Image (tube, rainbow, N blue to C red):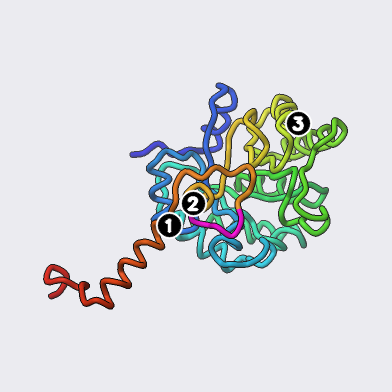
Amino acid sequence: MVKKVTVSTIQKYKDNNEKFSVLTAYDYSTAKYIDEAGIDIVLIGDSLAMVALGYETTHSVGMEEMSIFTKAVAKGVQRAMVVTDMPFLSYHTDVSSAVKNCGQMIKLGANAVKIEGFNEHILNVIRRLVETGIPVMGHLGFTPQFLNTLGGYKIQGKTREAAEEILKQAKELEKAGVFSIVLEMVPQESAKYISENLRVPTISCGAGKYCDAQVLVSDDVFGKFSDFKPKFARQYGDMKSLIFECAKKFDEDVKSGNFPSEKEIF
């Protein structure tokens, strides 16, 4: 039996000053491969709105799509913790519907959910989820679901005062019961200060090297998504070219009569 990564595992990483890794996945086979590679948390990110479904922002993806992707990814993972991003408006209206929607993801195979932002309602949702037995990952700094109120893709926590405010929010999330907090697009110095003053682990999404973990969108890591590339993403492969070349060779073989061969027919 493979030893499953849990909230206790993640906290031990923090306590022992060990880094851990987080990657997104949106399908069974990708989830299976990155789990086997040793990634600690597999995130079904609402970034799938752009990289998998072609939407312009995360606002367009809903519970139906997130449910389908969560079910597929969960089936491919044995060791890693599976976390689902809760989509826009799935937890914003009332606590009861938030618990129901988050509970649906747990039933489909997720081990935890991720919720963006900070306000009294979100704190109440987190408290109730934790009471219900649903682990919650927080998300502060730049929060894509609040893109319109933030005024665009802007770095957060650039001043001492702004960093203190994020730390204040993070401490409230910690009290509410989150097991970790994503810090997105926060200056490295601010993220370091915030991380050092929290008990729970922080996960950097463009927040520098001093957080307890790093998260990236797998399509950026693999070089598959090419519409845009975040400054903080590192490309480790060139799947775009691989897919293009494979498709081109298949097309040529079909049209030339080279496929199928005698080995590939009944």
Above or below, 124 against 26 in this view is: above
- Looking at the image, is mark 1 or mark 2 earlier in the sequence? 2
- Residue underneath mark 3: 190
Query: Which amino acid type is marked by label 2?
Result: Gly
Q: Is residue 226 magenta?
A: yes
Estimate the x, y position of residue 205 in percent, counting from the top left: 64, 42
Q: Residues within 10 Å of mark 2 (few under 14, many from 20)?
A: some
Name the residue rendered at 83%, 48% in the picture: 120
Numbered disc in front, either 3 or 1: 1
- Looking at the image, is mark 3 or mark 1 earlier in the sequence? 3
Q: Residue furthest right?
A: 161
Which of 184/110 is in front?
A: 184
- Residue underneath mark 1: 241
Name the residue rendered at 62%, 37% in the picture: 203
The magenta segment: 223-228
Residue contact between numbered discs 1 and 2, judged by CB atoms under 8 Å: yes
Name the residue rendered at 72%, 36% in the picture: 174
- Residue underneath mark 2: 223
For label 1, the SS is helix
Estimate the x, y position of residue 157 in percent, counting from the top left: 80, 38
